[in-house]
């Protein structure tokens, strides 16, 4: 290490679970699982800005902290923690390590509003734990400055839904966001619900049974177009795809379907009025052609495209540029009162 280089930042990690049963309209006990990744505190630490991260379809919270052969070179969380930010990454209700409904068909009664409410309930408990500390997991107490919502794909939709519901964040960082959906990956019977969000939600249980075979659809495998579009890594090496596949999980279909139908969550997007940075890959599912119209109340809106990047931006060969661009935007919004 050069003599004038800063020493590497020590990163702390913890895994937590939170009871969100009251937010889920299904009988039983429900817990959400979260990861906390943050820089080890020092005596001079100021209040920490917390990035609240929600993954996309068929991805767990580990998407934000990817590991490859013992290295975290693809980890968004570690890149941000090394720059002084705390990262909370959640598994949505019914996915990853969070509680799944029993019987499985009970998942038909869980809508995106319930997922957003459960994420909010877990966030409030998680922030309390960050403030109080948890000696058992080696987590010291931290003062919290700001919360910034971070979503990827379907997680961007759920971040927007949560913000419209509870307004927990002072800014939003949205990867591959669009209320335009992905009509080329859904059939005409679903496209017929375009721009009818209330009807879509009212008829969602029947749609899930008819179109997905139930609340938990199988993930496409092989070289099918939708799988390549969602999980393709382009020019990145095989280890990048392996890291991505290791973060894959089941999908509670209501979230994916709502995000894929055009206008499925437009009413929530129309309520957003905090600063927003949207990031797309140059080979992504979405671009920034319609973003201003989709967020009419946002006055501080920036978009940015990452070159040589597909839908899952963190495995791109150009990810170091991504870390720097995100850090510049966060640094401008991290201090309370700025």
Image (spheres, rainbow, N blue to C red):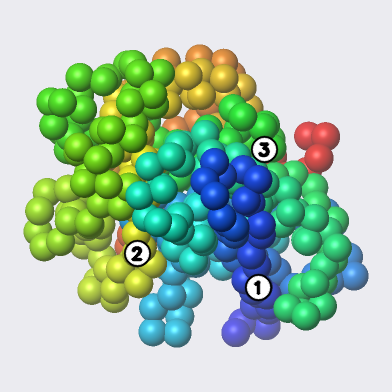
Q: Earlier in the sequence, mark 3 or mark 2?
A: 3
Along the line of sight, the residue nearer the viewer: 286 or 216: 216
Q: Position of residue 128 (x, y in %)?
A: 80, 55
- Which label was assigned to residue 169? 3
Residue at the extreme right: 43
Quadrant position of residue 243: bottom left
The alpha-carbon separation of the residues under discs 1 and 3 comes to 22 Å
Quadrant of image for the N terminus: bottom right
**Residue that appears at 65% across and 67% down:** 16
| Residue 7 visible | yes
| Within-10-Å neighbours for mark 1: few <14, some 14–19, many 20+ | some
Q: How many marks?
A: 3
Which residue position is annotated with label 2? 248
Q: Position of residue 150 (x, y in %)?
A: 54, 46
| Residue 148 visible | no
Is residue 309 rendered to the left or right of residue 92? left
Q: Earlier in the sequence, mark 1 or mark 3?
A: 1
Q: Position of residue 172 (x, y in %)?
A: 57, 37
Image vertical order of residue 220 relative to residue 157, above or below: below
- Which label was assigned to residue 14? 1
Image vertical order of residue 217 relative to residue 288, above or below: below
Quadrant position of residue 227: bottom left
**Residue that appears at 34% across and 31% down:** 204
Task: Identify the element where label 2 is drawn.
Answer: loop
**Residue that appears at 44% across and 69% down:** 66
Is residue 125 rendered to the left or right of residue 164? right
């Amino acid at each position: 290490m050069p003599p004038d280089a800063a020493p590497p930042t020590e990163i702390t990690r913890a895994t937590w679970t939170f009871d969100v049963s009251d937010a889920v309209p299904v009988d039983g006990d429900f817990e959400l699982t979260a990861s906390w990744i943050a820089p080890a505190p020092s005596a001079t630490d100021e209040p920490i800005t917390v990035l609240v991260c929600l993954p996309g379809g068929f991805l767990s919270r580990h998407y934000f902290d990817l590991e490859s052969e013992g290295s975290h070179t693809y980890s968004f969380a570690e890149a941000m923690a090394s720059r002084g930010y705390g990262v909370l990454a959640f598994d949505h209700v019914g996915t990853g390590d969070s509680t799944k409904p029993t019987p499985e068909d009970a998942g038909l009664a869980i809508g995106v509003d319930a997922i957003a409410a459960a994420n909010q309930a877990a966030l409030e408990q998680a922030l309390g734990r960050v403030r109080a500390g948890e000696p058992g997991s080696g987590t010291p107490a931290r003062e919290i400055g700001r919360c910034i919502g971070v979503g990827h794909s379907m997680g961007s939709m759920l971040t927007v839904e949560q913000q419209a519901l509870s307004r927990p964040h002072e800014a939003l960082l949205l990867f591959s966001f669009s209320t335009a959906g992905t009509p080329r990956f859904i059939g005409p019977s679903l496209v017929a619900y375009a721009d009818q969000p209330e009807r879509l939600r009212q008829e969602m249980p029947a749609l899930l049974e008819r179109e997905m075979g139930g609340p938990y659809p199988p993930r496409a495998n092989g070289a099918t177009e939708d799988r390549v579009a969602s999980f393709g890594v382009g020019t990145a090496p095989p280890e990048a795809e392996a890291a991505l596949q290791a973060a894959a999980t089941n999908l509670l279909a209501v979230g994916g379907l709502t995000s894929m139908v055009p206008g499925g969550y437009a009413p929530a997007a129309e309520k957003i009025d905090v600063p927003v940075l949207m990031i797309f890959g140059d080979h992504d599912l979405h671009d920034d052609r319609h973003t201003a119209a989709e967020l009419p109340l946002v006055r501080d809106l920036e978009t940015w495209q990452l070159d040589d990047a597909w839908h899952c931006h963190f495995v791109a060969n150009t990810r170091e540029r991504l870390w720097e661009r995100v850090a510049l935007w966060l640094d401008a919004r991290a201090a309370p009162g700025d």
